[in-house]
Every structure is written in C-alpha cells, then in structure tokens.
Image: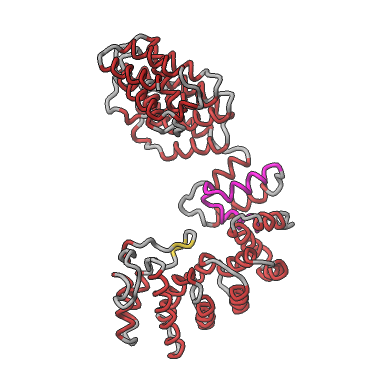
Amino acid sequence: MRAYVAGGQASEHAANEEPELAARTICTTLRAFDTVSLPESKHVRVVLLDLVARLTRREISEQAFFVIEETLLELARAESQAWTGSTTMLWKRLFQPAQPIPQSWSARLRRLDGRLGDTHEVNRTLAVAALHEGLRIYDFDSPSEEIVSKKAQLWNRLLDACRDSAESVAHWARLSVVLNLEGGLLLRCLDDERFDRISAMLPTWTALERQALANSLRNANQAEFEDDDRARLDALAEALVPIDLQERLIAQVQYLRPAMADRQSRARDLELAAELLTRADLLPWAIDWLESAEAIRGQPFWRALGRADTTRSLQDRLVTRLRAGKPTTTLANYLIGWAEHGGSGVVEEWLDGTIDGDTLAEVSIRFYTAQMPTDSGWLRILRLVAQYQTSPAALAPLLQLPWSSSSIVHMAELLAQIEAQPDMAPLVLSGSVALLERETEASQQERLVAMMQSAALTCISQRVVIGLQRHVRRAIVQLTELDDSLRRWICSCECGPPATVSRPTTVSPARSWPSYSTGGSVIV
C-alpha cells in the first residue's frame, strides 16, 4: 500500500513538471517489489505506466531516462505481455529515430547498445525487436537526412545481431533483415559495405532463412530501385542460389509457382526425392517439414517419394507415424506415387493385408478416391466405408471425377451407406444433386430426392450453409420434371431453411452460417 501511494505521488510530480523527482520515485517504488509481487500489483503497474508515458515526453537527465527505460522493461515482464504488447511497444518507441523524444539520440543509442549486449537472451531479443521497429519504412513519408543517418546506425547494429551467440536472437535479426531490406534500399541506408556484410553472412544462415530472403528478392519491385541497387539485389540473389539438398528441397516445395505440375517439375521432384532417400541424416527433418504448413507442395512431393522409394524404405516409418497421429494424406500420397511406379495392384495388395483400423482405412479410401476408381476400386471403397469410420474429406474427391454409368450406380450406393451420418450430410446433399442431374431410373431418382431432402434438413439443423450454389442453380433449371415442392426446397437453400422446418430461434439466417469445409476441399 505504501508503494501504491508513492506511485500516485510520483504521477502528481510528473504532472507538476518535476520529472527528475518522479523518476527517482519510480526507482524507489520498484525497489519495494520483487519479481513475484509486482505482477500481482495491477494498480501500481497502471500508475507507473501512466507516469513513464508522461516522462518520455519530458526533458529529463540521462540518468532519469535510464530509469524510465528500466521501468518499462520491468512492467512488460510483470504483465507477461507478448513482445507486441502495449507496454513493450512504448519501450520500443524509445529507440525509434522518428519519435519526438527529448532525450538525445546518442543517449538512447547507448542504452539500446546495452540491451543488445545484455547477458539475458530475452533482453537481446527485445532489443532486436526495437531495431526492427526503428527500421520499418512506413513510419514517415519523406525522412530527413538525419533520420536516414540514424536508421543506418540501426542497420549496423541489426547486422551485428545476426551473429548473436543465441540462435533464437540471431534468427529474429535475420528475419528483420529480410523484412526491411527493400525499405533500406529505398531510403539509401544500405551502401556497398552493408550489402557486403549481408552477403558474407549468408553461409551462416539456415536454409529457411536463406529461402525467405530469396523469396523477398523475387517479390521486390525492381522498378523502384536505382541501377546500382538492382545490381546489388542481383548479386545477392546469385549468392542465394540453393546448393545443398535441404535448400534445394525447400526451394522446390515451399513455394507454389505457375506450371508446377508440368513434366519438368515432376522430374525435378523425382530427382530430389531420390537424392533425399540416400540422406539418412536429413530424412527425419525432411519428413517433419514436408508435413508442415510451410511445405506448400508437400503432397506432390510425397508422391515423388513414393515413385522414388523402390526399396520401400519409408513405408514402415510412415505407417508408424500415421498410427501416432500424423496426417493420413502423407501415406496416401506416398502410396499414389508407389502405384504410379509399380502399378495399383501391388499397392492394393499391400493395403488389403495392412488395414487394421479406421486410420489406415481412411488412407486406403484417399488412395482410391484420388484416382479414377475401377469397379473393383469402388467395391473396396464401399466395403471400407461400411466397415470403418472415415471423414468427408476422404470421400470428397469422388464428386470431382467424371462418372461412368457404373460409377453412378456405385455413387448412389455410397450415398445410401453414409446418409445416416450427420457429418456426411453436405456430401450426401451435393452428391444427390449431382446424380439427379444425370440420367437415373425413376425409382432411384425418388430415392435420391428423399436422400437430398433429409441431408438438407441435417445441414440446416447443424447450421451449415449449403455452398453448392452452382449445383443448386443448375438443379433448379434442369430438374423441371420434379414436383414443385422439391423446387421450392432447392430455392430455400439460397435464402434460408423452409418455413415448415422447426429450428432453434437462436439460429441465424442461412447466409450468415459458416461454410462447410473438409480440410481444404469445400464439399458444397
């Protein structure tokens, strides 16, 4: 309580333009707390934060400024904020060149240097974040020569931080270089010496960091730069050409480019996959990374691994990972590649002898639905769906395939098998509409209409928007021979559920309901 009163008095002193006394009071107040009690003292933190915010705009001595900086750092820790929190942002503003802070730039820079050389890794990371904020180009439109000079000083410190002894600190510094490189060129902060420093340190960067910089260079608007800057960027891009396997793999898989599915890209995938299979030291990392969100082209590359792995060295490892909860798409794509190399028969035989639960059953279904199922393939799908639990996402590709007369019969049978499962309702609905657009027998048509109506009611009760607007509109036009009640129901899919359907009053109109998705493939 005594500390709280002292904090309140300090705030009054600041308001009465006694900043030096206020700064000393801050020091006294902080000494009354330890690292445990300060986080629990919310009111004290509020008073101190208000006080230091005022003091950053006052003429104070260098010693008092250091007290303010220390206070902000302590408050940020006490509040357990992320480094983007309000207190931390206030701290980082102390070191931004364009901020109207009365304290001299040399004093602010000395304090920042102290944080960059701090023994605590978290403080060095925060100092790198302050450098990043200070280098961002959108702080102002027409910086003065003085501001540009100050930013150049920050660039020197950022490049030093790229070699920090702690890899996490160095990583954030390198990421800041990637994000601020274009702005540094536009402001003329990066001369030949600084560019040479960046080029010289590239061998110490990780493969992901190098690829991030290469991608940034590809996306840069070259027309904005002077000729000498474009030459610097070209030289930097040349230094970033992938050399080792890890970098080449990332460059091939991390980014989606036009015509990536052409023959040349498939050949490149196969070449890298074959080389990767010889690198036992790199395989664990590669398998994890290829399943991550960063591997944009992960699925086609898994197919390449299936084609290249003639000894099936990955097979057991992928099954083990699958049973540990890894995505079913990994093994499914690997098997598709295996089938492309050795034929579907050998893969089907392996699957028949391996399936022992829902997870492997879903892999099998994904394998069959990713290609044009034969009659035997359809029979396998129907048997697996009847015996095991699967997801709508595994069956969704069937709707995108061209259907033969036998496929129509099998699809109708599949819809009949899954119509009782609530999570399959959107798939049943879209499949029923698609079948009704084709020539079907009168008895089958009647069954499909009933199935479609039942699935729609389930979707309505689950607050699922029927996003199959394209199918719905076509059905309205093409199914004119059906009775008026069905056409009225189809129309209601676009504007809300039928008036006769009882539903909770809390349900929103259909247009505001969330769309139904199956892991990236929208069913309807």
Residue 227 showing in the rendered view: no
| Colour convention of the picture | secondary structure
Q: Position of residue 518 (x, y in %)?
A: 48, 62
Give left or right: position of 129 versus 356: left
Figure quadrant of residue 462: bottom left
How many numbered marks are there?
0
Q: Which residues are magenta?
A: 281-306
- Against 442, residue 477 (above or below) is above
Q: Residue furthest front?
A: 1
Q: Is residue 239 visible?
A: yes
Q: Where is residue 260? Give x, y as percent.
A: 50, 53
Residue 295 falls within the magenta-colored stretch: yes
Question: Which residue is at the front of the view, 423 or 165?
Answer: 423
Give x and y (percent) for residue 444.
46, 87
Q: Quadrant of the C terminus?
A: bottom left
Q: Along the line of sight, which residue is nearer the eye, 510 or 188? A: 510
Residue occupying the point 39% across, 15% down: 108
Side of 380 where 193 appears, left or right: left
